[in-house]
């Protein structure tokens, strides 16, 4: 199967999710199914890493619960993820911030915060790039 066909098949499983990066504090609302009951659970923590591409994209989130570090690897486009909310933008220089695992106490929860104005400019630039990328395939098909 070629990559174009695969991308088309994957698009129907992808849903709209907010942009976030490692270092951001997010709250993920997941659906938990137990026998015939269903409930929602919120997992709030710092994003350590984002891996994969397309429908297979996953992210690792970490929080401290009762003094113990808890991590979850969550598929981004899972049907069990009902909502992802970005609480705080973090300013980190690495794509994988596994060094957070070694931190103890208050330091385990601290990540630098991005300047709000800078963040808005980057988001606007990303939107413009996405619009251009969406317009290009339509133009190239028209030329053929």
Image (spheres, grey):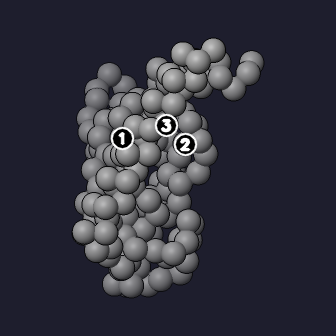
User: Between 7 and 42, which is closer to the camera in this rendering?
Assistant: 7
Label 1 packing within 10 angstroms: few (<14), some (14-19), many (20+) = few
Q: CA distance from mark 1 to mark 2?
A: 12 Å
The residue at 32%/73% (across/down) is: 114
User: Is disc 3 in contact with disc 1, using a CB cutoff of under 8 Å?
Assistant: no
Please, is residue 40 above or below residue 136 in the view?
below
Query: Which residue reaches farthest right?
Result: 1
Q: On the picture, is 3 further left or further right than 92?
A: right
Q: What residue does disc 3 label?
A: 133
Question: Percent x, y for residue 10?
Answer: 55, 24
Viewer-nearest of labels 3 and 1? 3
Q: What residue does disc 2 label?
A: 57
The N terminus lies in quadrant: top right
Q: On the picture, is 97 further left or further right than 78?
A: right
Please, is residue 24 above or below residue 11 in the view?
below
Q: Of callouts 3 and 1, which one flags the residue occurring earlier in the amino acid sequence?
A: 1
User: Between 121 and 38, which is closer to the camera in this rendering?
Assistant: 121
The residue at 49%/37% (across/down) is: 133
Label 3 packing within 10 angstroms: few (<14), some (14-19), many (20+) = few
Please, is residue 25 above or below residue 85 in the view?
below
Q: Of callouts 2 and 3, which one flags the residue occurring earlier in the amino acid sequence?
A: 2
Q: On the picture, is 4 further left or further right than 137?
A: right
Label 2 packing within 10 angstroms: few (<14), some (14-19), many (20+) = some
The residue at 65%/23% (across/down) is: 4
Question: Percent x, y for residue 93?
Answer: 51, 75
Question: Percent x, y for residue 91?
Answer: 40, 74
The C terminus lies in quadrant: top right
Numbered mark located on residue 17 in the image = 1
User: Between 11 and 117, which is closer to the camera in this rendering?
Assistant: 117
């Amino acid at each position: 199967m070629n990559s174009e066909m695969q991308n088309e098949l994957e698009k129907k499983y992808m849903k709209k999710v907010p942009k976030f990066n490692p270092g951001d504090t997010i709250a993920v609302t997941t659906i938990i199914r137990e026998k015939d009951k269903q409930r929602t659970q919120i997992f709030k923590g710092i994003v350590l890493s984002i891996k994969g591409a397309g429908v297979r994209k996953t992210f690792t989130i970490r929080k401290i619960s009762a003094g113990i570090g808890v991590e979850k690897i969550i598929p981004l486009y899972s049907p069990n993820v009902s909502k992802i909310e970005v609480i705080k933008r973090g300013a980190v220089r690495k794509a994988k911030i596994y060094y957070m695992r070694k931190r103890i106490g208050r330091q385990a929860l601290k990540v630098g915060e991005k300047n709000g104005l800078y963040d808005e400019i980057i988001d606007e630039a990303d939107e413009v790039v996405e619009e251009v990328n969406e317009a290009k395939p339509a133009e190239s098909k028209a030329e053929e």
